[in-house]
Every structure is written in C-alpha cells, then in structure tokens.
Image (spheres, helix red, strand yellow):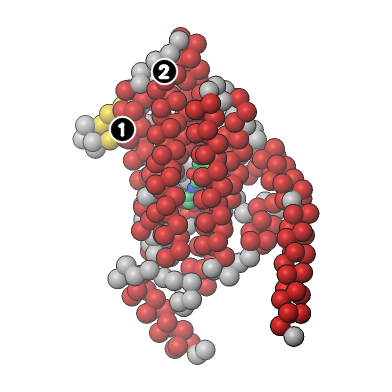
C-alpha cells in the first residue's frame, strides 16, 4: 500500500471516530489502535480471571447458605466476564494461548487490587462494594468505547457488576449493624481496601502514559483522575449511611467543587504492587500457572476428541 493510501485510510478512520462510529474487527485500523486495545482488553480479561481468586478463598467458609450461593454465582460471573473479554480480544488477531503466555510470563499486567489478601469474611463485602464499585465507575464509560466488541461486552458486564456491588454493600450493611465484633470486622476491611481501591483506577493523569492517546481514540472516555473522583464522591455517602468511617483524615467536602477533597495516595505502594511486589502477586501467579499446567490433559483430550470426530466425518463422507 502506498503512503498516500495509508494516509487516506487514517483520515477516514479518524473521521469515523469523530462521528462516534463503532470500529469492527474487520475494519481497517491503525496498528497502534489494535495493539493498545489488545493491551487494555487482555489485561482487563486477566483481571477478571485473577480476580476470582481472592473471593474463591471464602466460598467454603461463607457464613450461610444464601451467602455461599451468592458468592459462588458472583465468582462464576467473573469467569464469564473474562471469557467474553478474551473472545473480544481474539477478534484483534491475538490467540488465547498468546494472551495466557503474556500473563504467565509477567508481560501482561492484571489489576493491582487482586494482589491483596482476603483475610476476613468482611473482605467479601468490601471487594463487592469497593472493587466492583470502582470497576463499574470505570466500565460504564467503556460501554461507549469505540471498538464494537469491547463496548458490547461491557454492557452485559456492567449489569452483572452492579449486582455484585449491591451484594457486597449488603454484606457490609449487615455487618455494620451487627455485633460490635462484626462492626469492627467491617471497619477493618474498609481500612485495608479503601486505598488500594483508589489505586485500582490507575496512576494520576500526569503519570498515565496511555490516557491522552486512548481518549483521542475514544477507547477511554474518562481519565483516571475523573473516575477516581467520581468513585470517592459516590462511595463516601454510602459509608456514612452504614456508619463506617473512610480511613482518610483529609477527606472533606469541597463546597466550591461540589466534590470531596481527599488525602495523598501512596503511589509508591501502587507501583511496587504493579511491579510484582504486592502481598499476593506470587501466590496469584502460582495459582494461574498451576491451573494452566494442570488443565493440559483436558485441552489434550478435547483436541483428541475433535480430531477423532473429524476423522469419522471424513470416513462417512467417502
Ligand atoms: N493495576 O497509562 P495508564 C473486576 C498500568 S476486574 C495494574 O493509566 P491505561 C473484578 C497500565 O496497564 C476489572 N496496572 O494505563 C474482577 C500501564 O502499564 P502498561 C478490571 C495498572 O490502560 C473480579 C501503566 O500502569 N478493570 O472488576 O490508560 C472480582 C500506566 O497506566 C493499573 C479493567 O481492567 C492497575 N490498577 O489505564 C471483582 C478496566 N492501572 O499496560 C471485580 C479496563 C494502570 O503500559 N482498563 N496500570 O504496561 C482500564 O480502564 C485501564 O486500563 C486502566 C489504566 C484505567 C486500568
């Protein structure tokens, strides 16, 4: 293709983005657009899959049958989100094996938040309330992202996440109005998960390497700082409602901005976790790599069965 032809394609592509048209897998797209979508979407898929682990930790110890059923269903939903997202990413020309390999070798990231341990039942409340809560704030704008398969996957994912957020909040509400020990457990979980939940929305805009270009391509519809502020403004009244205290002495309503001012986030901790030095990074990777290796016989069996089926079909045809 000549340079002029590529320029024309680029101009037409930018015009389609400006008209808010969806870009579909077989449409022409700049290579960087394709690559940055593979990066973000596969990391999103990995987060859903690794994100099953902290909650799976409590399925056998859920306090009632109702809680166990709800938690099981939630963890299954997360698996479904991961599978949608892997499929959507495959439409960009990368195989699932390659994506897994990138995760297992540390080339691809997954959300920092899943490198923290879930040490009490109340953590099931904070994961649903805060982690799914932050995820919804991040993902609702993604329903309007420019790449069709990603936008469509997000619509269903958001509906399910919103249910997850409510089930987490309900756990917290219940504990907060329970015995003093239960309330203390809820407060302790909030103290541990608050700051990592703010970090989950990504580095401050000034340090975010991808935001500018991703906003231009309408991959991202809001910046990391905008999303973080929205999450804080939405969540503080919820904590007030159930009588829990956000662990930030600098948190204060700003009348002029009609938003909360908040304290300093420990970005050093965030980067340490992203670089693999969080409390649970090693364990999370061990679990995922182990699942991949132990599942080899299932993949082999499925392939052998498919080959036999194909052979039989060919024999019948002659
Ligand atoms: N953790 O330029 P930036 C769920 C990386 S799961 C680790 O701002 P971007 C759930 C970033 O990748 C939902 N790394 O990046 C599941 C980049 O490094 P690379 C998870 C992070 O992409 C189970 C570098 O830092 N949601 O809900 O413009 C149970 C610079 O950052 C993080 C998604 O995945 C992080 N937190 O913006 C319960 C949403 N933040 O790639 C719940 C989709 C940043 O250059 N993703 N980095 O090596 C996004 O919206 C965006 O990718 C982000 C980051 C806002 C996360």
Residue hosting label 2 = 176
Residue 152 position, x and y percent, is: 41, 60
Residue 74 in view, yes or no = yes
Q: Is residue 286 left or right of residue 158?
A: right
Residue at (61%, 67%) from the top-left corner? 94
As helix, strand or loop, the secondary structure at mark 1 comes to: strand
As helix, strand or loop, the secondary structure at mark 2 comes to: helix
Q: Nearer the viewer, residue 122 or 246?
A: 122
Residue hosting label 1 = 260
Q: Check the picture and name the quadrant holding the C terminus.
A: bottom right
Marks 1 and 2: CB-CB under 8 Å? no
Residue at (42%, 65%) from the top-left corner? 148
Residue at (52%, 89%) from the top-left corner? 1
Between disc 1 and disc 2, whose residue precedes?
A: 2
Residue 59 position, x and y percent, is: 59, 31
Q: Is mark 2 within 8 Å of ligand 1?
A: no
Q: Is residue 40 left or right of residue 167?
A: right
């Amino acid at each position: 293709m000549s340079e002029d032809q590529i320029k024309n394609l680029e101009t037409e592509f930018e015009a389609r983005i400006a008209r808010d048209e969806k870009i579909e897998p077989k449409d022409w797209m700049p290579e960087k657009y394709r690559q940055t979508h593979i990066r973000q979407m596969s990391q999103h898929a990995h987060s859903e899959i690794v994100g099953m682990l902290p909650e799976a930790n409590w399925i056998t110890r859920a306090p009632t049958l109702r809680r166990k059923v709800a938690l099981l269903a939630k963890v299954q939903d997360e698996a479904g989100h991961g599978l949608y997202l892997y499929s959507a990413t495959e439409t960009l020309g990368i195989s699932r094996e390659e994506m897994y390999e990138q995760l297992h070798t540390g080339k691809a990231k997954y959300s920092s938040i899943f490198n923290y341990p879930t040490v009490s039942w109340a953590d099931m409340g904070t994961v649903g309330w805060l982690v799914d809560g932050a995820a919804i704030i991040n993902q609702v704008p993604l329903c309007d992202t420019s790449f069709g398969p990603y936008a469509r996957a997000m619509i269903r994912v958001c509906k399910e996440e919103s249910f997850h957020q409510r089930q987490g909040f309900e756990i917290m509400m219940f504990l907060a109005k329970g015995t003093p020990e239960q309330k203390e457990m809820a407060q302790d979980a909030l103290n541990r998960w608050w700051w990592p939940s703010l970090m989950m929305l990504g580095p401050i805009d000034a340090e975010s390497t991808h935001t500018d270009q991703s906003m231009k391509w309408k991959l991202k519809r809001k910046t990391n700082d905008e999303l973080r502020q929205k999450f804080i403004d939405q969540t503080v009244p919820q904590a007030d409602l159930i009588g829990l205290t956000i662990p930030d002495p600098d948190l204060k309503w700003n009348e002029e901005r009609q938003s909360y001012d908040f304290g300093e986030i420990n970005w050093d901790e965030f980067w340490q976790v992203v670089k693999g030095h969080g409390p649970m990074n090693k364990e999370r990777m061990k679990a995922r790599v182990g699942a991949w290796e132990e599942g080899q016989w299932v993949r082999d069996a499925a392939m052998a069965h498919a080959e036999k089926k194909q052979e039989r079909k060919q024999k019948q045809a002659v």
